[in-house]
Amino acid sequence: MEEKNVPKKTPMKAVGDFFKKDLVQYIVKRLLMFIPTLLLISVLVFFVIQLPPGDYVSAHIAALASEGEFVDADYAASLRADYGLDLPVYQQYFKWIKDIIWTPTDSTYYRLYGSHHNWKYSFAYGRDVWDVVNDRLGLTILVTAIIMIFQYAVSLPIAVYASTHQYSVGDYISSIIGFLGAAIPNFILAIVLMYLSYKWTGNANVGLFSQEMLQNGVHLYNFGEFLKRMIIPIIVIGTSGTCGIIRSVRAQMLDEVARQYTLTARAKGVPERTIIMKYCFRAAINPTVSGLGGVLSSLFSGSTVTAMVLNMQIQGPVLFKALQAQDMYLAGAIVMVQAVLVVIGVLFSDIALAFLDPRIRYSGGGR
Amino acid sequence: MKKRLIALLLAGTMALSMAACGSNDNTGSSAPSGSGGDVQQSQQGGSTPEGASPEVTAPPVEVTGFGEAPMLADQVSAGTLPKVEDRLPVEDDVFVDQVDAAGNALEIGTYGGVINLAGAGGSWGLSRPVLESIIRYNTDGTYYANVIKSFDHNDDYTVWTFKLREGMKWSDGDDFNADDITFWYYMCHLTNYDTKKSWACLKETVNDEDAWAVLEKVDDYTVTWTFVNPKFPADFIENGDFKWCWAPSHYLIDLIPDSIYVENPYWEKTGLDDETVLKNAQAKGIDAATVNDLGKAVAYYWWNEDGIPCLNSYTLSTKEGNNSRDAQLCILERNPYFWKVDAQGQQLPYCDEIHFNATSEDGQDQLMFRSGELDVLEVGMQDIASLLSDLGDKAQLRSFASTNWGSYLITFNYTCKEENYANLFSNSDFRQAISICVDREQVSGLLSEGFLEPGQCAPAEGNFGYDAEWEKKWTEYDVDKAKSLLEGCGLVMGSDGFYDFADGTDFVLTIYTYTDSGADQAYPVLEQYYNKAGIKCATKDIEVSAFDQEIDNNDWYAVLGPHTAIGGLSMRSRVQPFVPIAQSAEWYGDYGTYYGTNGAQGVAPEGDMAKLVEIYEKWNSTPDSAERDQYNLDIYNIHKENLWTIAYLKAAGSYCLINSNVKNYPELLVSDDLYQYQNIVHYWTLFKAE
């Protein structure tokens, strides 16, 4: 039987119809929902960050005491007054959110920085918060993107192979690797790999850049060295995600290949490759696609614990340091941006799902 | 084997460290010990009032010419840098560095290379290896004029004179002279622009009011500090705060707003408002939200901002990406105008750069040291044997004697809000019971793998005030005696097997620790002993800033591993750890607040606690070194009598591993605030052998 007998217009046509009718309305509705959602998140973020006892000044004074410098109560009080930390928390919050949304043209901040969005000053870094965030943004996106591409490029073919060759040697091997990858904490794997790197090559490859790169930058001539230093982060961060994707896509695929529509297609003589890739795979990656909501956020922050173990200068450790130092404006900014990206990411993933699964609708309930 | 190695190192370190600490008076100027040759340079050596030879003194040398690093010679050839003779102070005022802080002759080094260190850490991180201060100490406690050429005082100690080094220059080549002193004092310090309350060493009380020293510029290279009352060395030149008294006026002048101006005879208002000043700072690459932030950045933690001229051996690189202590690779570059030379007249430093390689985990430091990416590694004693065994002759161990008064300390809140607890803690029998109810031998094995010996909260052997009897006081293990002492304090054994107060209320010893202090690990061990003696315990482990806040709020009972512990090198280093005069240490709690706030807050001390302050005031008002040491010992005796803090083990030293090709790194040093910790290594004299 020929493939032409399969009713192939249905999914795309439905999505096309849907786009015409509902999508704009849906996106507008979701965008409007952003405002209260983000305001609610901002309140939570600001107050949760303030929950631990003490504030930046007490953390700063404690750090100074550790360095042998003593600070008296008057100085601490003057610092609190300078930073506005002597105000009630709700006043601090309103000032913070107001300045982020709109800093007026006649303010000192605008005249100095030329921006209407004052994310405030990072106490711990002694710089404008947005400058601190920007410093590591490019590298964080680059590293996380490389790792993600690695994850999907490796895991999806393996998952398809494992599901179509269930209980074969290849399936067992991928399962074992999957279980090991999921079971071994990233930071332990990182330490082991760095040690092995030191033992085998004499260089532990700590961090993404050599001293030479940190002085002269990454260029074509030392790009190979950079890629070499990417091996451990890719293996460590990539494999854990890879294992999860393999396991979930494989399980979904096994579900899909046993479904009635697959049997029907097979009975009608549709080529196996078409059945697997065009129908089963599309359905199987639904959960993975719906999980893409967090991708933008993780692109922004990177993996904090693993980044610290591997000494990677990406955003995660900055957030950690900000929280440790109770640098609330910096921590608040990072978490807020992450929240915005999650909200946007979820919207994108919802739209992407519509392409993949015509049964999904955004209005009018299920059909 | 490991234990023996460490024990030997500790013993050696202690024996050699600070044997003479406190034995010298240091009120005289550090007179140049001239070479008798063509050139008379300032020489390094401890100062004594009688002119007697200090213990650490270099023999005079004759320097007949100056050398410089090849990289600087190239710049001279290219015409981008003046000749070395023009960059150094005039010949008589050049500082000849011949011996290290322990008095060993320095090896003449070779130029070039990089010293790789681990991350810079906190606010002081970049300054530790390179900060040049007014005076500099040797490990034996003697000191000498460093940045300034000499210091002197009149007979009644009301006028102090600082002579500067003629021809000395800032790292950008501008002249360093008396204007930079008056600028710092009148424009940065008295204005509180550096955001620190003006230092006590420059303050006195006149007619019951605070009064400040009058600074006068005598000529371009001489200034005087004048006080109404005698200002003795301990409270002036030896005061730990008084590390510098200069700022680069030519660079900072457009960063001083009129809003903070204080009337003075040397500097007029700049005519700049706050916003203009912040814009000027931005143009110089300095980011600050307020004038206070700016002042703190450029006039206090100035070494953390690139571009600010300094007098240190190395300056922060101006290269984007390497110019911040937060950078993964932070670089300090040689100061081409550095004013010290070696015994052969070669301008220091030897190495071209110091690199701070930021890491986020201790294990990374070790891996980087093993692979040769770091030259110096601070290491815990438990890792020394394995690292040395793996690295063989590629690495060498360097020891820093500790000036701490013991390890695993517990202290109590004598000003506790609950009167029954405060009274109990104040009873020395209670503290004795807490001390002797613990088996220190066993604690040593459990908490330090036997590395640290049993001991008490007392000066370590080799330190000023060491007293063998004190070190062993209340260290015997005797649970029955402890119980009897507790009962003598009025505690009554309850039906649950734990002591209660006499009025029947529960007695629970709530012990605070702060996260990562190590005390949280010690608590479960000590709790077993306390329980065995009938003391019911609870613990509260909190983040350090919250911990400090609870201490400040006087909302605590006992602390294990106090954040600001009793003890240290001596009162010469810092007074606060020994005397309750500030709101800083746990062992005196709100008594310190009382003095710190001039009686406005806190609790007025009584008895021996008050006696400490009385003796301190005498110590502070005598110029006589021997008398001062005696007062210091009197204060120590009160501590010995009271043991306000109990220690269970002796203090641990600190250790560094260095790459064997790093030369001139002294073998035995002392780690203390007085010496600015790593500053005592004298990084500008280190060089790397081929």
Image: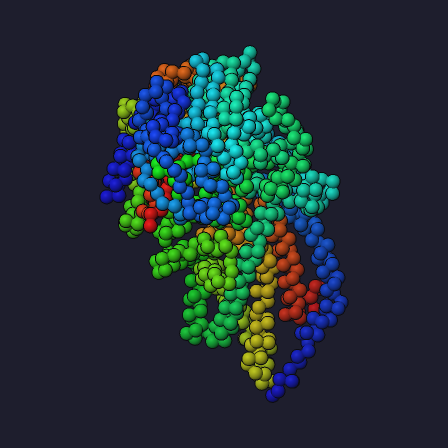
Q: How does the figure colour the protein chain or chains?
A: rainbow
The percent position of residue A203, horizontal first and vertical second, equals: 38, 56
- Residue found at x 45% / y 65%: A178
The reply to whether residue A51 is in sight is no
Q: Residue furthest front?
A: B38
The percent position of residue B399, horizontal first and vertical second, equals: 32, 38
- Residue found at x 52% / y 21%: B218
Q: Is residue B201 left or right of residue B291?
A: left
Foreground residue, B570 or B78? B78
The percent position of residue A172, horizontal first and vertical second, equals: 42, 71
B421 to A214, vertically: above or below: above
The percent position of residue B285, horizontal first and vertical second, equals: 59, 43
Q: Quadrant of residue B383?
A: top left
- Residue found at x 59% / y 71%: A283
Foreground residue, A358 or B640? B640
Foreground residue, A68 or B29? B29
A164 to B527, vertically: above or below: below
Q: Quadrant of residue B527?
A: top left
- Residue found at x 69% / y 66%: A361
The quarter of the picture where the N terminus of chain B appears is top left
Q: Is residue B469 left or right of residue A127?
A: left
Q: Residue furthest bottom?
A: A1
Number of numbered discs visible in the structure rendering: 0
